[in-house]
Image: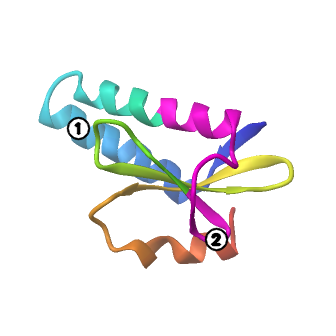
Amino acid sequence: MNFRFHPQALGEFEGAVVHYEQRQAGLGSRFSASIQAAIEGIVAAPETWPVFEAPIRRRLARVFPYAVLYAVLPEYVLIVAVMHCHQKPGYRQPRIAEPE
């Protein structure tokens, strides 16, 4: 199965990479690798991770306080958010109704 980022989720991901890289050289790359590993696991077995708010599922990233929120669609997995776990959860709700 393939995956796609919701445009805002891609922006969150890229913004977090820049943020971590500015904090410490190489940290942005480590964050990116952590999120990419989470996405690879999701694509390999999308039904494995728990439902966060139907129909959205959540996979936590390792090391970093982030979660990948996603929906399993017939043709692909849609990454709805790359969410910092301390953010207000409802901020990405409109993305579910209009995925792209």
Kindly indicate the quadrant of the structure image that contains residue 1. Answer: top right
- Residue 14 colored in magenta in the image: no
Three-letter amino acid code of the residue under disc 2: Ile
Asked whether disc 2 touches disc 1, contact meaning CB atoms under 8 Å apart, the reply is: no
Q: Position of residue 13 (x, y in %)?
A: 42, 45
> Residue drawn 35% across and 49% down?
66
> Residue drawn 71% across and 48% down?
77
- Residue 47 colored in magenta in the image: yes
Q: Position of residue 83 (x, y in %)?
A: 40, 57
The span from disc 2 to disc 1 (Cα, nearest Å) is 27 Å
Q: Secondary structure at mark 2?
A: helix
Residues drawn in magenta: 36-57
Tell me the residue that label 1 is attached to: 20
Q: Is residue 98 left or right of residue 49?
A: right
10 Å neighbourhood of mark 2: few (<14), some, or many (≥20)?
some
Kindly indicate the quadrant of the structure image that contains residue 16. Answer: top left
Q: Position of residue 65 (x, y in %)?
A: 29, 49
Q: Position of residue 78 (x, y in %)?
A: 67, 52
Q: Secondary structure at mark 1?
A: helix
10 Å neighbourhood of mark 1: few (<14), some, or many (≥20)?
some
Q: How many marks?
A: 2
Q: Earlier in the sequence, mark 2 or mark 1?
A: 1
Kindly indicate the quadrant of the structure image that contains residue 52. Answer: bottom right
> Residue drawn 49% across and 71% down?
92
Q: Is residue 63 above or below residue 90?
A: above
Of all residues, the one furthest to the right in this rendering is 74
The figure's colour scheme reads rainbow
Three-letter amino acid code of the residue under disc 1: Tyr
Q: Is residue 47 left or right of residue 52?
A: right
Of all residues, the one furthest to the left in this rendering is 23
Tell me the residue that label 2 is attached to: 96
